[in-house]
Amino acid sequence: DMLALRQLCDFPASFSQADERGWFPLHWAAVQPLVLVLETVLYASFRLTLEEKTSEGETFLTLAVGDGLLENVKLLLENGASPHTTNSKNETPLLL
């Protein structure tokens, strides 16, 4: 829930840890339908660049585009995510 997520924001180091698939919490937030989740995690993830990739080469933006989450895409672009970064298939978010 959002209260628990906001409490985690008091521990920003937890947002800079990737899992075994190379997914940071911001990758997970990018595919959540509630843009408030992404917004909260985005600001807690200040230590990351917006071009961090999963082990499969997906950025936060390519994941949001792939899931059709337009509000998430807009938020990521407004915060500096590049629409030109390629994934492991040499696709950019513009091609998805």
Image (cartoon, rainbow, N blue to C red):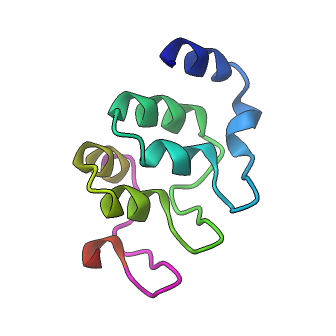
Q: Residue at x 59, y 66 (%)?
A: 53
Q: Is residue 90 magenta?
A: yes
* Vertical arrangement, residue 76 with respect to residue 52, above or below: above
Name the one closer to the observer, 61 or 77: 61
Q: Is residue 71 above or below residue 86?
A: above
- Residue sitting at x 56%, y 74%: 57
Q: Nearer the viewer, residue 65 or 49?
A: 65
Instruction: Tell me where residue 9 sits by quadrant.
Output: top right
Say left or right for 37 vs 21.
left
Report the magenta residues as a range.
78-91
- The structure residue drawn at horizontal position 66% and vertical position 22%, both measured from the top left corner, is 8
Magenta run includes residue 19: no
Where residue 34 sits: x, y (%)? 35, 32
Q: Nearer the viewer, residue 79 or 64?
A: 64
Residue depicted at 36% across the width and 77% down the height: 92
User: Picture quarter containing residue 54?
Assistant: bottom right
Q: Residue 78, image x and y in percent?
A: 31, 47
